[in-house]
Amino acid sequence: MLDKNGIAQRIAQEVRDRWYVNLGIGIPTLVANYIPDGMDVEFQSENGILGMGPFPMDGDEDADLINAGKQTITAMPGAVYFDSATSFAMIRGQHVQLTVLGAMEVAQNGDIANWKIPGKMVKGMGGAMDLVASAENIIVAMMHTNRAGDSKLLKACSLPLTGVGCVKRVVTNLAVLDIQGGAFHLVERAPGVSVDEIIAATDGTLVVPDDVPEMQIS
Amino acid sequence: MLDKNGIAQRIAQEVRDRWYVNLGIGIPTLVANYIPDGMDVEFQSENGILGMGPFPMDGDEDADLINAGKQTITAMPGAVYFDSATSFAMIRGQHVQLTVLGAMEVAQNGDIANWKIPGKMVKGMGGAMDLVASAENIIVAMMHTNRAGDSKLLKACSLPLTGVGCVKRVVTNLAVLDIQGGAFHLVERAPGVSVDEIIAATDGTLVVPDDVPEMQIS
Amino acid sequence: MAISKVVKGSAEACKGVQSGMTLMLGGFGLCGIPECSIAELVRMEVKDLTCISNNAGVDDFGLGLLLQKRQIRKMISSYVGENDEFERQMLNGDLEVDLIPQGSLAERCRAGGAGIPAFYTPAGFGTEVANGKEVRDFNGKPHVLESALTADVAFVKAWKGDKAGNLIFKATARNFNPMMAMAGKITIAEVEELLPEGALNPNEIHTPGIFVQRIFQGENYDKRIEQRTVRPRQIESNG
Amino acid sequence: MAISKVVKGSAEACKGVQSGMTLMLGGFGLCGIPECSIAELVRMEVKDLTCISNNAGVDDFGLGLLLQKRQIRKMISSYVGENDEFERQMLNGDLEVDLIPQGSLAERCRAGGAGIPAFYTPAGFGTEVANGKEVRDFNGKPHVLESALTADVAFVKAWKGDKAGNLIFKATARNFNPMMAMAGKITIAEVEELLPEGALNPNEIHTPGIFVQRIFQGENYDKRIEQRTVRPRQIESNG
């Protein structure tokens, strides 16, 4: 079974050289730590920076330089700042090659819910609706089940949707799954996790091939 | 009767302190020469400058600094450059207080034609259609008649339109006229021009008040 | 001479702001927010405000200060997760809230300033955000018709500004400020450094002064950091 | 490391440009046009091009060079008054021409790059530009629905650029370049000065490198002036 860093590490394997990548808050942010040396990748943060670097050294933080999670960050050489309209022009215009974000629920038709629990929690969608409606390549990073132990991979989302039919791949603490033809397809098992455990933790329709390789995480 | 500079000088009297003004090619460009000292006015040129100054000194011209008429210009202190989308955001968004432009024909309902003579001349509308569709305050600067001696103030435009019902005031070599309720209203006579001459040169319906003052041009 | 937009301070700048108005406020989280103007709005005790702002501040800073005093009737935002007082007022029904996708919010403000009454975007299709809105297919993909947003007064905060109202923002403090500057019937800019005419390079200006009606030198900027994330400063050993 | 977009010169930059393609070309008049790329297109002898450009150059410079060689099948522009060859070909019916309002052209390019398939504008209502287009009232005023423009390849010309494709334009040579950079499936930028990574201030960049796929150092810029208007340099007498 993977921890959050393991999920991030596995997703990093999906990133290709010369890609612009938008990483959401939480697990997705960790993906940046696992990009192989020598691979040229630039991180976009939708509040207005391309070429986002690591957190600043203690004492160097700048209130005017944050990411979409409101964390203090740094800028890499070659970085650029821009306004929010230009930022979403990049996203909506499909200039960003990969979006990684978290979710409360994912459905077997690719629907995603991650912004609201009616009557209980209303944080807002932020940029997530623009991202999922526009990105050609969306990976959801999340735990396979919620704190109550219920599956987050469902036949249909029960919460208000963030986007419809947009998720193509999900990476959880248990597995890598593709969404295709209205079902989850098991692609890889996390180290030490059995196919039965994944079946048990998945509420939606799950297609299991004869051979399910274990993830290669160094 | 006014010459081109006289028309420009009369139009300059319409300009108010603290206005942003877009001047078209030809006579309108000359208006900038007659703004009284001490009046703060900024000129916008739709190719991407606010705070346009006079022509450069001989030898100082810069191929990268032109106005919408492709003439070399200078920038005043406090000027700013921007792209074409931002420029027309200013125009469409009604941030520019006055537009002065030329015309081939103006109709008594406020229609204007100034971009095309079918089968003969097709220069294009440039920014004129955006300007006339958006500006709250449009003054047309033109000769009262064309080279053949025909009136340019018509019952209806015969040429393809640039905009509909948008012109509110026309300043010609003969007169100042307002457009209102589907007719031209004579407001002022040019120095030495009689009301009868104006009536003769106007094809559209012309409302003539009892008293038509002569323009005050210094 | 450029048209001067300079006013003395936040009090003169905010003259005419009234209860019941629709305001826009730049900033992302607490980054790039018009601190001095918000403080002035608290002093003025204007009420029943509709505030268009990407976020709602935190409990004791930014728009949270107006929420505390119950000066806001309605918020139009994309993300409000950092403010407990906000959530309380909303879940109680004391605060009307319109949550809209961040990209649509930015583009709707720009449209409002640019004289574009409406545009189509894929964001929000199939979600409750699209309820009651026209949907149309373009290139085989459904899009939602979104309308322009404008405000009676827009408040923006810049790093440097000049007499003519030209503005330069710093780093990611730019965010929503340029679009909101365009969309205000009156736009009030506060700046960390107010410079004389001609002091800014005309090639480096982010917001042309034509979009700004009043500009003032802000004071005592707090510039609070919401999430201070740092790496430890340690001497790395070699092996 | 930033993603490098650098190619050796115009020949490498234009690799893959083919007859029949739709191209965008930045510039206003002859100001800010991609001179080196146009010269390369002439050398390549690609034909049947659709060119989206505010103007069509003059007889012997800018897009006029492509018109001379009959490489252009269709022009999408707002003003073409400076080119006699253009007018000849158009009135003969050899050249298809779509004239559109300048502001709509700029906004349609931006929309194409920004993933906005269509928007409403008041420009052109009641004129032949609106023929066949949807008209809708907003705020009591009729508006025309205009669609996004994109191009197979967009050519832009900047003053300074860096390895990552970030661009800074000079003065009014900016014009259509930033929007067209956004709207090209492939965007090729030529620059007067190509600088290493990190040489540009990230706060002063007009076009972020994400919009640029190839960048090269241009050579032998002519930068022709269309209308040289000057004041005489004379010693002014005092009284």
Image: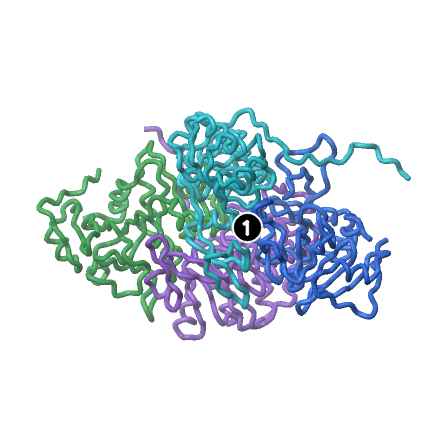
Chain colours: A blue, B green, C cyan, D purple
- Residue displayed at 51% across by 65% down: C138
- Residue displayed at 42% across by 31% down: C46
Q: Which residue position holds label 1?
A: C101
Name the side, left or right, on which D94 lies relative to A52. left
Quarter holding the C terminus of chain C is top right
- Where residue D179 sits: x, y (%)? 53, 55
Spot the residue most to the left.
B210
- Residue displayed at 12% across by 53% down: B197
Label 1: which secondary element: loop
Task: Name the residue nearer the viewer: C38 or C9.
Answer: C38
Question: Can residue C162 be seen in this snapshot?
Answer: yes
Q: State the image quarter where residue D102 is shown.
A: bottom left
Name the side, left or right, on which A103 lies relative to B42. right
Q: State the image quarter where residue A157 is shown.
A: bottom right
- Residue displayed at 44% across by 28% down: C45
- Where residue C70 sits: x, y (%)? 48, 32
